Image (spheres, rainbow, N blue to C red):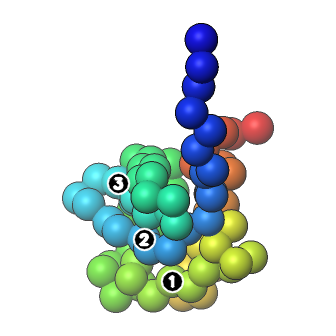
Amino acid sequence: MNFSAIKLDSHAVEVVFTEDAVRFVLVDGREISAPLEWFPKLRDADDRKRNHWRLIGKGSGVHWPDLDEDISVSFLIHGRE
């Protein structure tokens, strides 16, 4: 059996919120989401604070300075370790 080799790049380029989830858009086109229940600071924040984020580690994670919250792409892919 042959498998096509696709290079996956697990770096975030965008963050999107829905009513009950946070979604990271990755540079390779994947989208990974997690329930806001996992992140009480984000769940309880207003839209202004949620949307004030910056990429850290060249997109390996996202930081919300107003909330002192960081989420890594690795955490969203692999879960709690």
Give 9 or 6, whichever is nearer the viewer: 6
Q: Relative to 81, is 74 above or below?
A: below
Q: State the separation of the CA atoms marked 3 and 1.
A: 16 Å
Sequence order check, earlier mark of 3 and 1: 3
Q: Which residue occupies 26% across, 60% down?
A: 18
Give the residue number, with chain letter if any, for mark 2.
Answer: 15
Measured as percent of width and height from the top left, residue 31 is found at 42, 53
Q: Mark 3 points at which residue?
A: 21
Q: How far apart are marks 1 and 2 (CA)?
A: 8 Å
Q: Nearer the viewer, mark 2 or mark 3?
A: 2
Residue extending farthest top: 1
Given the image, on which type of amino acid does mark 2 rest?
Val
Say how many tags the image has: 3
Q: Which numbered disc, 1 or 2, marks the residue closer to the eye? A: 2
Q: Is mark 3 on a helix, strand or loop?
A: strand
The foreground one among 48 and 76 is 76
- Left or right? Give the position of 81 relative to 26: right
| Mark 2 or mark 3, earlier in chain | 2
CB under 8 Å between discs 1 and 2: yes
Residue 35 or residue 54, whichever sits in front: 54
Question: Helix, strand, or loop for circle 1?
Answer: loop
Query: Quadrant of the image for the N terminus?
Result: top right
- How dense is the environment of label 3, judged by Cα within 10 Å: few (below 14), some, or many (20 and up)? some
The amino acid pointed to by label 3 is Ala
| Residue 63 place in picture, x, y as percent | 61, 77
State which tag comes first along the sequence, 1 or 2: 2
Q: In this view, does 33 lie to the left or right of 63?
A: left
Task: Provide the residue designation for mark 1.
Answer: 53
Question: Which residue: 59% across, 25% down?
Answer: 3
Q: How far apart are marks 2 and 3 (CA)?
A: 11 Å
